[in-house]
Image (tube, coloured by chain):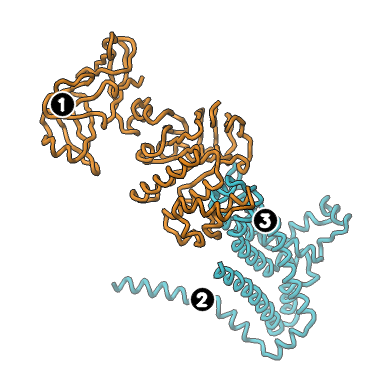
Protein backbone atom coordinates (compact mmCIF):
# COMPACT_ATOMS: atom_id res chain seq x y z
CA UNK A 1 0.00 0.00 0.00
CA UNK A 2 1.60 3.21 -1.08
CA UNK A 3 1.52 6.33 1.06
CA UNK A 4 -0.26 8.48 -1.51
CA UNK A 5 -2.13 7.24 -4.56
CA UNK A 6 -4.05 8.96 -7.34
CA UNK A 7 -6.10 6.52 -9.34
CA UNK A 8 -7.53 7.32 -12.80
CA UNK A 9 -8.37 10.92 -11.89
CA UNK A 10 -10.55 12.91 -14.31
CA UNK A 11 -11.25 16.60 -13.72
CA UNK A 12 -13.38 18.66 -16.08
CA UNK A 13 -13.35 22.43 -15.58
CA UNK A 14 -14.41 23.40 -19.12
CA UNK A 15 -11.23 25.48 -19.70
CA UNK A 16 -9.01 22.74 -18.30
CA UNK A 17 -9.25 19.01 -18.27
CA UNK A 18 -7.27 16.31 -16.54
CA UNK A 19 -7.64 12.80 -17.84
CA UNK A 20 -6.58 9.38 -16.57
CA UNK A 21 -4.05 10.66 -14.06
CA UNK A 22 -2.64 7.83 -11.94
CA UNK A 23 0.49 7.71 -9.81
CA UNK A 24 1.74 6.57 -6.40
CA UNK A 25 4.18 8.08 -3.94
CA UNK A 26 5.98 6.61 -0.93
CA UNK A 27 6.36 8.53 2.30
CA UNK A 28 9.21 11.03 2.00
CA UNK A 29 9.10 11.09 -1.80
CA UNK A 30 9.70 14.42 -3.52
CA UNK A 31 7.78 14.51 -6.78
CA UNK A 32 8.50 17.22 -9.33
CA UNK A 33 5.87 18.00 -11.96
CA UNK A 34 6.99 19.72 -15.12
CA UNK A 35 5.12 20.54 -18.30
CA UNK A 36 4.13 23.47 -20.49
CA UNK A 37 1.74 26.17 -19.29
CA UNK A 38 -1.87 25.05 -19.48
CA UNK A 39 -1.04 21.39 -18.92
CA UNK A 40 -3.36 21.24 -15.91
CA UNK A 41 -0.62 21.04 -13.28
CA UNK A 42 -2.17 23.57 -10.89
CA UNK A 43 -5.59 21.97 -11.29
CA UNK A 44 -4.05 18.64 -10.27
CA UNK A 45 -2.62 20.15 -7.07
CA UNK A 46 -5.89 21.90 -6.27
CA UNK A 47 -7.79 18.65 -6.83
CA UNK A 48 -5.47 16.82 -4.47
CA UNK A 49 -6.18 19.42 -1.74
CA UNK A 50 -9.87 19.11 -2.53
CA UNK A 51 -10.87 22.36 -4.21
CA UNK A 52 -12.15 20.62 -7.36
CA UNK A 53 -14.45 17.65 -7.44
CA UNK A 54 -13.18 14.87 -9.69
CA UNK A 55 -15.50 13.65 -12.41
CA UNK A 56 -14.02 10.20 -11.96
CA UNK A 57 -11.21 8.56 -10.07
CA UNK A 58 -10.03 8.28 -6.49
CA UNK A 59 -7.35 9.71 -4.23
CA UNK A 60 -5.86 7.79 -1.30
CA UNK A 61 -3.69 9.07 1.51
CA UNK A 62 -2.16 6.77 4.13
CA UNK A 63 -4.48 3.96 3.18
CA UNK A 64 -7.76 5.85 3.43
CA UNK A 65 -9.71 7.33 0.59
CA UNK A 66 -9.95 11.13 0.66
CA UNK A 67 -11.66 11.77 -2.69
CA UNK A 68 -14.81 13.17 -1.02
CA UNK A 69 -13.11 14.62 2.07
CA UNK A 70 -13.35 18.40 2.68
CA UNK A 71 -10.03 20.25 2.22
CA UNK A 72 -9.85 21.22 5.90
CA UNK A 73 -9.78 17.55 6.98
CA UNK A 74 -7.17 16.30 4.49
CA UNK A 75 -4.06 17.61 6.21
CA UNK A 76 -2.52 18.53 2.85
CA UNK A 77 -0.67 21.85 2.66
CA UNK A 78 -0.37 24.08 -0.39
CA UNK A 79 2.14 26.83 -1.23
CA UNK A 80 1.42 29.09 -4.18
CA UNK A 81 3.74 31.01 -6.47
CA UNK A 82 2.37 34.35 -5.26
CA UNK A 83 2.63 33.13 -1.62
CA UNK A 84 -1.04 33.98 -0.73
CA UNK A 85 -0.13 35.47 2.64
CA UNK A 86 -3.08 36.92 4.56
CA UNK A 87 -2.50 40.69 4.16
CA UNK A 88 -4.17 41.85 7.38
CA UNK A 89 -2.24 39.36 9.55
CA UNK A 90 1.34 39.74 10.76
CA UNK A 91 3.94 37.15 9.79
CA UNK A 92 3.47 35.51 13.20
CA UNK A 93 -0.32 35.36 12.77
CA UNK A 94 0.09 33.98 9.26
CA UNK A 95 2.34 31.16 10.46
CA UNK A 96 0.20 30.47 13.52
CA UNK A 97 -3.03 30.45 11.46
CA UNK A 98 -3.26 26.71 10.90
CA UNK A 99 -1.66 25.84 14.21
CA UNK A 100 -4.50 27.51 16.11
CA UNK A 101 -6.93 25.04 14.55
CA UNK A 102 -4.95 22.15 16.03
CA UNK A 103 -3.67 23.16 19.41
CA UNK A 104 -3.84 25.92 21.98
CA UNK A 105 -0.55 25.33 23.76
CA UNK A 106 2.96 26.16 22.72
CA UNK A 107 1.96 28.01 19.56
CA UNK A 108 4.51 30.74 20.23
CA UNK A 109 7.44 28.31 20.55
CA UNK A 110 6.41 26.21 17.56
CA UNK A 111 6.13 29.30 15.37
CA UNK A 112 9.52 30.54 16.57
CA UNK A 113 11.13 27.16 15.87
CA UNK A 114 9.99 26.97 12.28
CA UNK A 115 10.77 30.67 11.77
CA UNK A 116 14.30 30.06 13.02
CA UNK A 117 14.87 27.11 10.72
CA UNK A 118 13.70 29.20 7.74
CA UNK A 119 15.62 32.28 8.97
CA UNK A 120 12.61 34.56 9.30
CA UNK A 121 12.44 34.91 13.09
CA UNK A 122 13.30 38.62 12.86
CA UNK A 123 10.23 39.26 10.67
CA UNK A 124 7.52 37.82 12.92
CA UNK A 125 5.95 41.18 13.87
CA UNK A 126 5.90 42.53 10.30
CA UNK A 127 3.03 42.68 7.83
CA UNK A 128 3.47 40.61 4.62
CA UNK A 129 3.41 43.67 2.34
CA UNK A 130 6.63 44.95 3.93
CA UNK A 131 8.59 41.78 3.06
CA UNK A 132 10.68 40.96 -0.01
CA UNK A 133 9.59 38.16 -2.34
CA UNK A 134 12.08 35.71 -0.86
CA UNK A 135 10.97 36.51 2.67
CA UNK A 136 7.31 36.14 1.77
CA UNK A 137 8.09 32.79 0.20
CA UNK A 138 9.74 31.54 3.39
CA UNK A 139 6.76 32.75 5.45
CA UNK A 140 4.43 30.83 3.13
CA UNK A 141 6.63 27.73 3.50
CA UNK A 142 6.71 28.11 7.28
CA UNK A 143 2.92 28.49 7.42
CA UNK A 144 2.40 25.27 5.48
CA UNK A 145 5.12 23.26 7.22
CA UNK A 146 4.31 24.26 10.79
CA UNK A 147 1.10 22.20 10.82
CA UNK A 148 3.12 19.16 9.72
CA UNK A 149 1.04 18.24 6.69
CA UNK A 150 1.08 14.65 5.50
CA UNK A 151 1.58 15.97 2.00
CA UNK A 152 2.95 19.35 0.92
CA UNK A 153 2.01 20.73 -2.50
CA UNK A 154 3.97 23.59 -4.06
CA UNK A 155 2.97 25.44 -7.21
CA UNK A 156 6.07 27.07 -8.72
CA UNK A 157 7.20 28.32 -5.33
CA UNK A 158 10.55 29.65 -6.54
CA UNK A 159 9.64 31.12 -9.91
CA UNK A 160 9.58 34.69 -8.64
CA UNK A 161 12.97 34.40 -6.94
CA UNK A 162 16.33 35.29 -8.47
CA UNK A 163 18.77 32.40 -9.07
CA UNK A 164 20.85 33.00 -5.94
CA UNK A 165 17.78 33.20 -3.70
CA UNK A 166 16.42 30.13 -5.43
CA UNK A 167 19.50 28.11 -4.47
CA UNK A 168 19.37 29.38 -0.88
CA UNK A 169 15.69 28.62 -0.52
CA UNK A 170 16.19 25.13 -1.98
CA UNK A 171 18.83 24.38 0.65
CA UNK A 172 16.67 25.71 3.49
CA UNK A 173 13.70 23.72 2.23
CA UNK A 174 15.71 20.50 1.93
CA UNK A 175 17.00 20.92 5.49
CA UNK A 176 13.52 21.47 6.92
CA UNK A 177 11.98 18.65 4.88
CA UNK A 178 14.69 16.15 5.78
CA UNK A 179 13.91 16.61 9.47
CA UNK A 180 10.18 16.12 8.93
CA UNK A 181 10.12 13.42 6.24
CA UNK A 182 7.38 15.38 4.48
CA UNK A 183 6.12 13.99 1.20
CA UNK A 184 6.13 16.71 -1.45
CA UNK A 185 4.61 17.38 -4.87
CA UNK A 186 6.20 20.40 -6.51
CA UNK A 187 5.42 22.10 -9.84
CA UNK A 188 8.33 23.82 -11.52
CA UNK A 189 9.55 25.12 -14.85
CA UNK A 190 13.15 24.78 -13.80
CA UNK A 191 14.92 21.47 -14.42
CA UNK A 192 17.50 22.52 -11.82
CA UNK A 193 14.74 22.34 -9.21
CA UNK A 194 14.14 18.75 -10.26
CA UNK A 195 17.83 17.77 -10.04
CA UNK A 196 18.31 19.54 -6.73
CA UNK A 197 15.19 18.48 -4.87
CA UNK A 198 13.24 15.61 -6.37
CA UNK A 199 13.51 11.86 -6.57
CA UNK A 200 10.39 11.38 -8.73
CA UNK A 201 9.48 13.24 -11.89
CA UNK A 202 6.18 13.60 -13.75
CA UNK A 203 5.70 15.19 -17.15
CA UNK A 204 2.29 16.66 -17.99
CA UNK A 205 0.88 17.93 -21.22
CA UNK A 206 -2.72 18.81 -22.18
CA UNK A 207 -4.15 17.31 -19.03
CA UNK A 208 -2.36 13.99 -19.46
CA UNK A 209 0.38 12.49 -17.33
CA UNK A 210 2.84 11.55 -20.08
CA UNK A 211 5.53 9.95 -17.97
CA UNK A 212 6.12 9.31 -14.30
CA UNK A 213 9.14 7.69 -12.71
CA UNK A 214 12.35 8.29 -10.87
CA UNK A 215 14.38 11.31 -11.92
CA UNK A 216 17.02 9.03 -13.47
CA UNK A 217 14.40 7.12 -15.37
CA UNK A 218 12.64 10.11 -16.89
CA UNK A 219 15.82 12.03 -17.67
CA UNK A 220 17.59 9.03 -19.24
CA UNK A 221 14.64 7.22 -20.76
CA UNK A 222 12.16 9.85 -21.90
CA UNK A 223 9.17 8.08 -23.43
CA UNK A 224 8.69 10.46 -26.35
CA UNK A 225 10.44 13.17 -28.33
CA UNK A 226 8.34 15.77 -26.55
CA UNK A 227 9.54 14.59 -23.15
CA UNK A 228 13.11 14.24 -24.43
CA UNK A 229 13.01 17.86 -25.62
CA UNK A 230 11.54 18.92 -22.32
CA UNK A 231 14.19 17.22 -20.21
CA UNK A 232 17.01 18.10 -22.61
CA UNK A 233 17.84 14.63 -23.99
CA UNK A 234 18.41 13.66 -27.64
CA UNK A 235 16.54 10.83 -29.27
CA UNK A 236 17.87 8.75 -32.17
CA UNK A 237 15.87 6.28 -34.28
CA UNK A 238 17.53 2.93 -34.79
CA UNK A 239 17.21 -0.80 -35.37
CA UNK A 240 18.51 -3.55 -33.11
CA UNK A 241 21.21 -5.43 -35.02
CA UNK A 242 22.25 -8.12 -32.58
CA UNK A 243 21.68 -9.06 -28.99
CA UNK A 244 24.14 -11.83 -28.38
CA UNK A 245 26.16 -11.97 -25.21
CA UNK A 246 27.22 -8.56 -23.97
CA UNK A 247 25.69 -5.25 -24.85
CA UNK A 248 23.04 -4.83 -27.51
CA UNK A 249 24.14 -3.42 -30.86
CA UNK A 250 21.88 -0.78 -32.40
CA UNK A 251 22.17 0.73 -35.88
CA UNK A 252 21.15 4.38 -35.73
CA UNK A 253 21.75 5.02 -39.43
CA UNK A 254 25.11 6.69 -39.62
CA UNK A 255 26.82 4.70 -36.87
CA UNK A 256 26.25 1.91 -34.36
CA UNK A 257 25.73 2.19 -30.62
CA UNK A 258 25.90 -0.41 -27.88
CA UNK A 259 23.34 -0.23 -25.10
CA UNK A 260 22.74 -2.10 -21.87
CA UNK A 261 19.03 -2.22 -22.80
CA UNK A 262 18.01 -4.73 -25.41
CA UNK A 263 15.18 -6.16 -27.44
CA UNK A 264 14.70 -8.51 -30.40
CA UNK A 265 17.01 -8.08 -33.43
CA UNK A 266 15.40 -6.27 -36.33
CA UNK A 267 13.12 -4.29 -34.04
CA UNK A 268 12.84 -0.52 -34.57
CA UNK A 269 13.75 1.38 -31.40
CA UNK A 270 14.41 4.88 -30.16
CA UNK A 271 17.48 5.47 -28.03
CA UNK A 272 17.92 8.41 -25.67
CA UNK A 273 21.24 10.11 -24.91
CA UNK A 274 21.86 12.86 -22.39
CA UNK A 275 24.16 15.69 -23.48
CA UNK A 276 26.06 15.58 -20.17
CA UNK A 277 26.79 11.84 -20.55
CA UNK A 278 28.84 12.31 -23.71
CA UNK A 279 32.57 13.03 -23.46
CA UNK A 280 34.58 14.49 -26.34
CA UNK A 281 38.24 14.39 -27.32
CA UNK A 282 40.33 15.46 -30.29
CA UNK A 283 42.36 12.25 -30.53
CA UNK A 284 40.84 8.81 -30.83
CA UNK A 285 40.90 7.42 -27.27
CA UNK A 286 42.33 3.98 -26.73
CA UNK A 287 42.07 1.34 -24.05
CA UNK A 288 38.53 2.23 -22.97
CA UNK A 289 36.06 -0.61 -22.90
CA UNK A 290 32.26 -0.57 -22.70
CA UNK A 291 32.33 2.74 -24.48
CA UNK A 292 30.87 3.81 -27.76
CA UNK A 293 33.45 5.83 -29.68
CA UNK A 294 32.02 7.81 -32.56
CA UNK A 295 33.99 9.89 -35.06
CA UNK A 296 32.07 13.11 -35.68
CA UNK A 297 32.44 16.58 -37.12
CA UNK A 298 31.92 19.67 -34.94
CA UNK A 299 29.09 21.72 -36.45
CA UNK A 300 28.90 24.60 -34.01
CA UNK A 301 29.44 25.65 -30.39
CA UNK A 302 26.43 27.20 -28.62
CA UNK A 303 27.34 28.90 -25.35
CA UNK A 304 24.72 28.68 -22.59
CA UNK A 305 25.77 30.39 -19.40
CA UNK A 306 28.76 28.73 -17.79
CA UNK A 307 28.60 25.75 -20.14
CA UNK A 308 28.32 25.24 -23.89
CA UNK A 309 26.54 22.81 -26.16
CA UNK A 310 28.65 21.23 -28.90
CA UNK A 311 26.59 20.17 -31.88
CA UNK A 312 28.27 17.18 -33.51
CA UNK A 313 27.25 15.52 -36.74
CA UNK A 314 27.87 12.15 -38.37
CA UNK A 315 26.44 12.67 -41.86
CA UNK A 316 22.73 13.29 -41.14
CA UNK A 317 22.73 12.33 -37.48
CA UNK A 318 23.24 15.03 -34.86
CA UNK A 319 24.42 14.69 -31.28
CA UNK A 320 24.56 17.44 -28.71
CA UNK A 321 27.10 17.43 -25.92
CA UNK A 322 27.27 19.57 -22.80
CA UNK A 323 30.76 20.71 -21.80
CA UNK A 324 32.11 23.43 -19.54
CA UNK A 325 33.42 26.55 -21.27
CA UNK A 326 36.84 25.73 -19.85
CA UNK A 327 36.81 22.35 -21.52
CA UNK A 328 35.86 23.92 -24.86
CA UNK A 329 38.87 26.24 -24.61
CA UNK A 330 41.23 23.36 -23.68
CA UNK A 331 39.89 21.20 -26.47
CA UNK A 332 40.93 23.86 -28.99
CA UNK A 333 38.51 22.88 -31.73
CA UNK A 334 36.54 24.97 -34.18
CA UNK A 335 33.56 24.14 -36.40
CA UNK A 336 34.45 21.71 -39.19
CA UNK A 337 37.12 19.89 -37.13
CA UNK A 338 36.77 16.18 -36.52
CA UNK A 339 36.14 15.19 -32.94
CA UNK A 340 35.51 11.90 -31.09
CA UNK A 341 32.42 11.44 -28.94
CA UNK A 342 32.33 8.77 -26.27
CA UNK A 343 29.34 7.44 -24.38
CA UNK A 344 29.01 4.47 -22.05
CA UNK A 345 26.66 1.67 -23.02
CA UNK A 346 25.00 2.22 -19.66
CA UNK A 347 24.00 5.71 -20.79
CA UNK A 348 22.53 4.62 -24.12
CA UNK A 349 18.95 3.78 -23.17
CA UNK A 350 16.27 2.25 -25.33
CA UNK A 351 13.11 4.27 -24.91
CA UNK A 352 10.66 2.15 -26.88
CA UNK B 1 4.00 71.14 -29.52
CA UNK B 2 1.29 73.70 -30.34
CA UNK B 3 -1.10 70.88 -31.20
CA UNK B 4 -0.43 69.20 -27.92
CA UNK B 5 -1.25 72.39 -26.09
CA UNK B 6 -4.48 72.78 -28.00
CA UNK B 7 -5.39 69.24 -27.03
CA UNK B 8 -4.58 70.02 -23.43
CA UNK B 9 -6.79 73.13 -23.42
CA UNK B 10 -9.69 71.26 -25.01
CA UNK B 11 -9.59 68.57 -22.32
CA UNK B 12 -9.38 71.15 -19.56
CA UNK B 13 -12.24 73.20 -21.01
CA UNK B 14 -14.49 70.16 -21.33
CA UNK B 15 -13.69 69.23 -17.75
CA UNK B 16 -14.56 72.70 -16.50
CA UNK B 17 -17.83 72.74 -18.45
CA UNK B 18 -18.86 69.43 -16.90
CA UNK B 19 -17.97 70.53 -13.36
CA UNK B 20 -19.89 73.77 -13.84
CA UNK B 21 -22.83 71.84 -15.27
CA UNK B 22 -22.99 69.70 -12.13
CA UNK B 23 -22.15 72.30 -9.54
CA UNK B 24 -23.91 75.43 -10.77
CA UNK B 25 -27.54 74.24 -10.37
CA UNK B 26 -26.70 72.58 -7.06
CA UNK B 27 -25.00 75.66 -5.63
CA UNK B 28 -27.77 77.88 -6.92
CA UNK B 29 -30.38 75.71 -5.25
CA UNK B 30 -28.46 75.38 -1.99
CA UNK B 31 -27.95 79.13 -1.65
CA UNK B 32 -31.38 80.25 -2.80
CA UNK B 33 -33.43 79.83 0.38
CA UNK B 34 -32.86 82.34 3.16
CA UNK B 35 -31.75 81.21 6.60
CA UNK B 36 -35.16 81.93 8.09
CA UNK B 37 -36.88 79.86 5.46
CA UNK B 38 -34.56 76.97 6.16
CA UNK B 39 -35.26 77.29 9.86
CA UNK B 40 -38.97 77.42 9.26
CA UNK B 41 -38.85 74.36 7.01
CA UNK B 42 -36.96 72.21 9.47
CA UNK B 43 -39.57 73.02 12.10
CA UNK B 44 -42.22 71.67 9.76
CA UNK B 45 -43.14 68.24 11.11
CA UNK B 46 -44.07 66.90 7.67
CA UNK B 47 -40.64 67.74 6.29
CA UNK B 48 -38.78 66.16 9.19
CA UNK B 49 -40.99 63.08 9.02
CA UNK B 50 -40.49 62.64 5.30
CA UNK B 51 -36.71 63.04 5.47
CA UNK B 52 -36.54 60.59 8.34
CA UNK B 53 -38.77 58.16 6.43
CA UNK B 54 -36.51 58.49 3.37
CA UNK B 55 -33.41 57.77 5.41
CA UNK B 56 -34.67 54.78 7.26
CA UNK B 57 -36.44 53.13 4.34
CA UNK B 58 -33.27 53.54 2.28
CA UNK B 59 -31.27 52.16 5.22
CA UNK B 60 -33.61 49.16 5.48
CA UNK B 61 -33.28 48.58 1.73
CA UNK B 62 -29.50 48.59 2.09
CA UNK B 63 -29.74 46.20 5.05
CA UNK B 64 -31.85 43.77 3.02
CA UNK B 65 -29.40 44.08 0.13
CA UNK B 66 -26.55 43.34 2.56
CA UNK B 67 -28.22 40.24 4.01
CA UNK B 68 -29.43 38.67 0.77
CA UNK B 69 -27.02 40.25 -1.70
CA UNK B 70 -23.74 39.32 0.00
CA UNK B 71 -24.04 35.55 -0.52
CA UNK B 72 -25.19 36.10 -4.11
CA UNK B 73 -22.28 38.46 -4.79
CA UNK B 74 -19.92 35.85 -3.35
CA UNK B 75 -21.25 33.07 -5.58
CA UNK B 76 -21.03 35.30 -8.65
CA UNK B 77 -17.47 36.30 -7.81
CA UNK B 78 -16.22 32.79 -7.07
CA UNK B 79 -17.91 30.45 -9.50
CA UNK B 80 -18.35 30.10 -13.22
CA UNK B 81 -21.36 28.26 -14.51
CA UNK B 82 -23.56 28.19 -17.55
CA UNK B 83 -26.05 31.05 -17.46
CA UNK B 84 -23.93 33.23 -15.18
CA UNK B 85 -24.10 36.14 -17.62
CA UNK B 86 -27.87 35.79 -17.73
CA UNK B 87 -28.05 36.03 -13.94
CA UNK B 88 -25.76 39.07 -13.95
CA UNK B 89 -27.99 40.71 -16.54
CA UNK B 90 -31.08 39.98 -14.46
CA UNK B 91 -29.43 41.65 -11.47
CA UNK B 92 -28.72 44.73 -13.60
CA UNK B 93 -32.30 44.94 -14.88
CA UNK B 94 -33.55 47.36 -12.18
CA UNK B 95 -30.92 49.87 -13.36
CA UNK B 96 -32.27 50.04 -16.89
CA UNK B 97 -36.02 49.73 -16.29
CA UNK B 98 -37.80 53.12 -16.25
CA UNK B 99 -38.72 53.98 -12.66
CA UNK B 100 -42.52 54.19 -12.93
CA UNK B 101 -42.42 50.79 -14.65
CA UNK B 102 -40.72 49.38 -11.56
CA UNK B 103 -43.59 50.66 -9.43
CA UNK B 104 -46.19 49.24 -11.75
CA UNK B 105 -44.38 45.89 -11.94
CA UNK B 106 -44.29 45.62 -8.17
CA UNK B 107 -47.95 46.48 -7.88
CA UNK B 108 -48.69 43.79 -10.45
CA UNK B 109 -47.58 41.08 -8.03
CA UNK B 110 -48.60 42.88 -4.84
CA UNK B 111 -52.16 43.59 -5.97
CA UNK B 112 -55.25 41.62 -4.99
CA UNK B 113 -55.41 39.97 -8.41
CA UNK B 114 -52.14 38.13 -7.91
CA UNK B 115 -51.74 35.08 -5.67
CA UNK B 116 -48.70 36.68 -4.02
CA UNK B 117 -50.65 39.85 -3.25
CA UNK B 118 -53.50 37.73 -1.85
CA UNK B 119 -51.05 35.78 0.29
CA UNK B 120 -49.53 39.03 1.61
CA UNK B 121 -52.92 40.54 2.45
CA UNK B 122 -53.91 37.31 4.22
CA UNK B 123 -50.88 37.48 6.50
CA UNK B 124 -51.49 41.20 7.00
CA UNK B 125 -48.75 42.71 4.87
CA UNK B 126 -49.83 45.68 2.79
CA UNK B 127 -47.58 46.88 -0.04
CA UNK B 128 -49.72 49.60 -1.61
CA UNK B 129 -49.39 52.90 0.25
CA UNK B 130 -47.28 51.54 3.11
CA UNK B 131 -43.75 51.79 4.50
CA UNK B 132 -43.34 48.11 3.57
CA UNK B 133 -44.15 49.01 -0.02
CA UNK B 134 -41.58 51.81 -0.02
CA UNK B 135 -38.90 49.48 1.33
CA UNK B 136 -39.76 46.87 -1.30
CA UNK B 137 -39.42 49.44 -4.09
CA UNK B 138 -36.16 50.90 -2.75
CA UNK B 139 -34.67 47.44 -2.33
CA UNK B 140 -35.63 46.64 -5.91
CA UNK B 141 -33.86 49.68 -7.34
CA UNK B 142 -30.88 49.61 -4.94
CA UNK B 143 -29.94 45.89 -5.05
CA UNK B 144 -27.89 45.96 -8.29
CA UNK B 145 -25.61 48.64 -6.87
CA UNK B 146 -24.92 46.64 -3.76
CA UNK B 147 -24.44 43.29 -5.49
CA UNK B 148 -22.12 44.70 -8.17
CA UNK B 149 -19.94 46.63 -5.72
CA UNK B 150 -19.54 43.64 -3.41
CA UNK B 151 -19.01 41.20 -6.29
CA UNK B 152 -16.10 43.37 -7.46
CA UNK B 153 -14.80 43.41 -3.90
CA UNK B 154 -14.86 39.62 -3.64
CA UNK B 155 -13.29 39.24 -7.07
CA UNK B 156 -10.33 41.34 -5.98
CA UNK B 157 -9.57 38.88 -3.17
CA UNK B 158 -7.53 35.94 -4.45
CA UNK B 159 -9.38 32.64 -4.01
CA UNK B 160 -5.94 31.23 -3.23
CA UNK B 161 -6.08 32.95 0.18
CA UNK B 162 -9.23 30.98 0.93
CA UNK B 163 -7.71 27.80 -0.51
CA UNK B 164 -4.65 28.11 1.71
CA UNK B 165 -6.83 28.82 4.73
CA UNK B 166 -8.87 25.68 4.14
CA UNK B 167 -5.80 23.56 3.53
CA UNK B 168 -4.62 24.74 6.95
CA UNK B 169 -7.71 23.26 8.57
CA UNK B 170 -10.17 26.19 8.58
CA UNK B 171 -13.77 25.53 7.57
CA UNK B 172 -15.45 27.63 4.88
CA UNK B 173 -17.33 29.62 7.55
CA UNK B 174 -14.18 30.29 9.53
CA UNK B 175 -12.30 31.18 6.35
CA UNK B 176 -15.01 33.62 5.32
CA UNK B 177 -15.20 35.32 8.69
CA UNK B 178 -11.45 35.53 9.31
CA UNK B 179 -10.12 36.22 5.83
CA UNK B 180 -12.73 37.05 3.19
CA UNK B 181 -14.97 39.30 5.28
CA UNK B 182 -12.19 41.46 6.78
CA UNK B 183 -10.80 42.00 3.27
CA UNK B 184 -14.22 42.63 1.69
CA UNK B 185 -16.03 44.72 4.29
CA UNK B 186 -14.89 47.99 2.76
CA UNK B 187 -16.46 47.07 -0.55
CA UNK B 188 -19.59 46.05 1.37
CA UNK B 189 -19.70 49.48 2.97
CA UNK B 190 -19.29 51.10 -0.43
CA UNK B 191 -22.08 48.84 -1.69
CA UNK B 192 -24.31 49.94 1.18
CA UNK B 193 -23.57 53.61 0.46
CA UNK B 194 -24.26 53.16 -3.27
CA UNK B 195 -27.41 51.18 -2.62
CA UNK B 196 -28.87 53.61 -0.08
CA UNK B 197 -27.84 56.62 -2.17
CA UNK B 198 -29.71 55.15 -5.11
CA UNK B 199 -32.67 54.29 -2.87
CA UNK B 200 -32.93 57.71 -1.24
CA UNK B 201 -33.12 59.39 -4.65
CA UNK B 202 -35.91 57.18 -5.96
CA UNK B 203 -39.12 58.97 -6.84
CA UNK B 204 -40.87 57.52 -9.88
CA UNK B 205 -41.28 53.98 -8.57
CA UNK B 206 -42.23 55.02 -5.05
CA UNK B 207 -44.87 57.49 -6.15
CA UNK B 208 -46.68 54.70 -8.00
CA UNK B 209 -46.61 52.27 -5.08
CA UNK B 210 -46.93 54.66 -2.09
CA UNK B 211 -47.74 58.34 -2.46
CA UNK B 212 -48.42 58.23 1.26
CA UNK B 213 -46.63 57.92 3.65
CA UNK B 214 -44.57 60.58 1.97
CA UNK B 215 -40.86 60.13 1.47
CA UNK B 216 -38.82 63.30 0.98
CA UNK B 217 -38.70 63.27 -2.86
CA UNK B 218 -42.49 62.85 -3.00
CA UNK B 219 -43.01 65.66 -0.49
CA UNK B 220 -40.61 67.77 -2.52
CA UNK B 221 -42.59 67.12 -5.67
CA UNK B 222 -45.84 67.90 -3.93
CA UNK B 223 -44.52 71.21 -2.59
CA UNK B 224 -43.23 72.10 -6.03
CA UNK B 225 -46.53 71.27 -7.71
CA UNK B 226 -48.69 73.05 -5.14
CA UNK B 227 -46.56 76.03 -4.05
CA UNK B 228 -43.80 76.39 -6.64
CA UNK B 229 -40.04 76.44 -6.78
CA UNK B 230 -39.48 78.75 -3.83
CA UNK B 231 -41.23 76.43 -1.38
CA UNK B 232 -39.65 73.24 -2.62
CA UNK B 233 -36.07 74.56 -2.48
CA UNK B 234 -35.64 74.56 1.34
CA UNK B 235 -36.88 70.96 1.56
CA UNK B 236 -34.41 70.01 -1.16
CA UNK B 237 -31.58 71.74 0.71
CA UNK B 238 -32.36 69.82 3.89
CA UNK B 239 -32.65 66.49 2.09
CA UNK B 240 -29.37 66.96 0.26
CA UNK B 241 -27.60 68.20 3.39
CA UNK B 242 -28.74 65.29 5.51
CA UNK B 243 -27.75 62.76 2.84
CA UNK B 244 -24.35 64.37 2.28
CA UNK B 245 -23.71 64.49 6.02
CA UNK B 246 -24.57 60.80 6.41
CA UNK B 247 -22.39 59.67 3.51
CA UNK B 248 -19.56 61.89 4.66
CA UNK B 249 -19.67 60.32 8.12
CA UNK B 250 -19.58 56.82 6.59
CA UNK B 251 -16.66 57.75 4.33
CA UNK B 252 -14.70 59.27 7.19
CA UNK B 253 -15.30 56.18 9.31
CA UNK B 254 -13.95 53.91 6.57
CA UNK B 255 -10.95 56.11 5.87
CA UNK B 256 -10.02 56.17 9.53
CA UNK B 257 -10.14 52.40 9.65
CA UNK B 258 -7.86 52.18 6.63
CA UNK B 259 -5.23 54.15 8.50
CA UNK B 260 -5.56 51.97 11.57
CA UNK B 261 -4.67 48.87 9.62
Q: Residues within 10 Å of mark 2 (few under 14, many from 20)?
A: few
Percent position (x, y) of residue B45? Answer: 80, 81
- Color of chain B here? cyan
Q: Quadrant of the C terminus of chain A?
A: top left
Residue ID at (43%, 33%): A204
Residues tagged by mark 2 and mark 1 found on one chain of the structure = no
Instruction: Provide residue A109's location: percent of width, then percent of height.
Output: 55, 54
Q: Secondary structure at mark 1?
A: strand
Question: Which chain is drawn using orange?
Answer: A
Q: Residues within 10 Å of mark 1 (few under 14, many from 20)?
A: many
Give the residue at mark 1: A340
The numbered disc on residue B69 is: 3
Question: Is A153 situated above or below B245?
Answer: above
Q: In the rendered structure, which disc, 2 or 3, sits on the residue that comes first in sequence?
A: 2
Q: Secondary structure at mark 3?
A: helix
Residue bearing mark 2: B19
Amino acid sequence: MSFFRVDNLHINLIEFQLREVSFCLDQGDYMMIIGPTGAGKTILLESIVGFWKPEKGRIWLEGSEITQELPEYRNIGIVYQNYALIPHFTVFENIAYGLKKKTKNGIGETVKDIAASLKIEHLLHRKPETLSGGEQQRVALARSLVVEPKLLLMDEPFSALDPRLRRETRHLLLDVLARRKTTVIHISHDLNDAWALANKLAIFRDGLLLQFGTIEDVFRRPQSRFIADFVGASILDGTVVANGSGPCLIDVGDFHLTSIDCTDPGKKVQVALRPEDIIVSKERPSGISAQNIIATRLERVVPEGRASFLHLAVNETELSVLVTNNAVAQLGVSPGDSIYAMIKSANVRIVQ
Amino acid sequence: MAKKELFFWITISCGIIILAFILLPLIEMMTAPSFSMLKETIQDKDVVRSIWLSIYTAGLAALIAFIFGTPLAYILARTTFRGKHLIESIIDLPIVIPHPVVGIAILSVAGKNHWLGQFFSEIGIRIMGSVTGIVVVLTFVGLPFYVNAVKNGFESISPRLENVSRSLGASMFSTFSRITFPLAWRSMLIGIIMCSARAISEFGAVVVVAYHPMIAPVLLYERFESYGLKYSQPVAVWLVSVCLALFLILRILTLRNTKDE
